[in-house]
Amino acid sequence: METLLQGKASGVTVGTSGVPGAGASIRIRGFTTFQQNEPLYVVDGARVGSISDLNPNDIESLQVLKDASSAAAYGAAAANGVIIITTKRGKGKPKVTYDAYYGVQSLTKQFDLLNTEEYGRYLYLLQKGANPSGKFFNLGQYNGGKDSTDAPVIPEYILAGTSSGLQAGDPAADPSKYKLDLNDVSNDEKTYLIVKANKAGTDWMKEVTQTAPMQSHNISVSGGSETGNYLLGLGYYNQDGIVVYTGYKSTL
């Protein structure tokens, strides 16, 4: 809801974390204190603490007061500006209105991450560059480091809790010497866990993001005459987050 104010008036800034359903931060006169900087919200003449739960389709008009005139009408509560909202009223013959939209969000630019082989090469060049004499530290799980001609080698297995990488056929990779069950917490001589190495690597940006759909549906029934008017509205909003397992759903 608050994002509707972005660009509507000069001097009004709207910031959001981008998390689905997270409220926006509205600043009309910048940061005046280290505590309360939110403007005063007035909806149909009543002061409210937030407009996050207000259906945007129910708004008839929106006005931003940011100069001395706002303080004159609302006193000290208007120190950070005032946002005045008037909601719709029914009029004329009974009318049913329905509007909806559907869209998707996606991460357009992702980090170009190193895969397993590229990361090993990076460690190799890093240590080689730091030691021009030709001697550098061991490459740990990549089994390198004897001299400057040793290229990184992707291991078949990794000894958990250490930086040791093992190849297939290595006596140290004998499964009988290690715990293979991740749920085995017994205290015995098999205190180390040997795991099969992920030689292809994992693109974590791809794993934690997704193409996220979003949809909105709003229906209203309105009407009015000289003796009275009415408007009944119902809104449904559902947004999945670009980061997996995040999202926001609301009924207004």
Image (spheres, grey):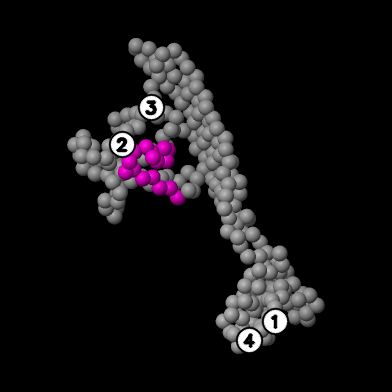
Q: In what element is the residue under mark 3?
A: strand
**Crowd rating for badge 2 (residues with CA inside 10 Å; few <14, some 14–19, many 20+):** some
Q: Which mark, residue 60?
A: 3
Give, as a single range, the part of the protein colored magenta.
Answer: 1-17
Closer-to-camera residue (74/211)? 211
Label 1 or label 2, whichever comes before in sequence order: 2
Give the number of the mark in front: 1 or 2. 1
Label 3 or label 1, whichever comes before in sequence order: 3
Residue displayed at 58% across by 55% down: 110
Q: Amino acid at mark 3?
A: Glu
Residue located beneath label 2 in the image = 64
Closer-to-camera residue (38/211)? 211
Closer-to-camera residue (113/178)? 113
- Can you give x and y, in whole percent of width and height, for residue 32 in the image? 26, 51
Residues at marks 3 and 1 touching, judged by CB atoms closer than 8 Å:
no
Q: Is residue 17 above or below residue 50?
A: below
Residue found at the far front of this picture: 132
Q: In what element is the residue under mark 4?
A: loop
Q: Is residue 48 left or right of residue 251?
A: left
Residue displayed at 60% across by 57% down: 205
Q: Is residue 75 above or below residue 228?
A: below
- Answer with the quarter of the image where residue 63 lies: top left
Q: Amino acid at mark 2?
A: Val
Residue located beneath label 1 in the image = 150
Residue located beneath label 4 in the image = 134
Q: Is residue 227 above or below residue 98?
A: above
- Can you give x and y, in whole percent of width and height, for residue 147 in the image? 67, 86
